[in-house]
Image (cartoon, grey):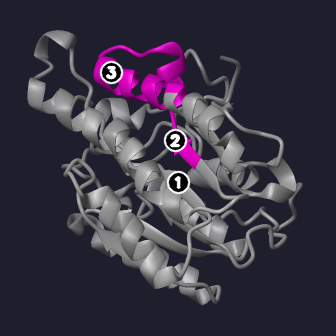
Amino acid sequence: MSTSSPITEPKPDFPQQHQDKPGLESELDPSPRWQGKRYRPAGKLAGQAALVTGGDSGIGRAVAYHFAREGADVAITCLREEMGDAKEVQQAVETLGRRCLILTGDLQEEGVAEEFIRRSVDELGHLNVLVHNAAWQNRKPISELEESELDRTMKVNVYAYLRLVKAALPHMRPGSTIIATGSVVGLGGSKELADYGATKGAIHSITKCLAEELAEKQIRVNCVAPGPVWTPLNAADQGTTPEKIAQFGKDTHWSQMGRPAQPEELAPAYVYLASNADSSYVTGVVLPVTGGPI
């Protein structure tokens, strides 16, 4: 396929659907596009090793696969219920001749982030790129937000980011990179996502703080802030109805494209930020990929 081929990405109306948590890519209709057929790799991550949390589906899946296309071995994390999706990623990566390590565990639990780092380094031999992408989201009015929900959202989205970086730093050499997944919700807000939006705003701020702190170690820290993306995260949001999923991304005050992004449209931004060939002078940036102006 030519890189200049017209873009004909899926648009709403999608089939009405809803999933139980955590949500599976294999059950999403239409299937998200994640392999980037228009993308042209150039060996930008040759010989490197990357850890991608939430790499079984959605943005994380596309990122892990694109990193492998650029020459990196990858470790991906998932929950045990997501193992089927993760094995599909593993098979695709290994078809490219790269290694793909699957790590299972719940990032809200203390010690799991540290174990993910330890096993990645032990089994891949080193760690050059850390991507914290896994997230927890449920739409709820603030009046219905329970302490347990707030606690989980904070731990998966924010605590895990800090824990992962703290554990990874002793293994990361100059030229290594750290990338977080933020959100347009952390930039502009969204109804009934106060806790999720708070975590994404925190991720943006943490990214800037870490970029300043780690500059002397020559480790760059950046963040991608997606708009609406067609992933299981949204179909498994317990505060969203099947009717709303069918209209997902059609009419938002961020995107002017009338559709959600496909995961493969986000992955090149992560490659850019991971590659010292492309972004060696970029750190502390929150890069919006939202389908429109913020």
Evaluate if marks 2 and 1 touch, with contact meaning CB atoms under 8 Å apart.
yes
Is 215 left or right of 235, judged from the image as shown? right
Q: Which mark is residue 131?
A: 1
Instruction: Read off the residue under disc 2.
Output: 181
Quarter-wise, where is residue 86 in the image?
A: bottom left
User: Is-magenta flag for residue 191?
Assistant: yes
Image quarter for residue 199? top left
Residue stretch in magenta = 179-205
For disc 1, the neighbor class at 10 Å (few under 14, some 14 to 19, many from 20) is many
Q: Does 96 sit above or below residue 126?
A: below
- As helix, strand or loop, the secondary structure at mark 1 comes to strand
Rounded to the nearest angstrom, the CA distance separating label 2 from label 1 is 8 Å
Name the disc covering residue 193, or none: 3
Q: Secondary structure at mark 2?
A: strand
By secondary structure, the bulk of the magenta-drawn segment is best described as: helix
Which of the two labelled residues, at mark 2 and mark 1, occupies the earlier sequence position?
A: 1
Is residue 88 among what the camera can see? Answer: no
Q: Is residue 195 left or right of residue 179?
A: left
| Sequence-wise first label, 3 or 2 | 2
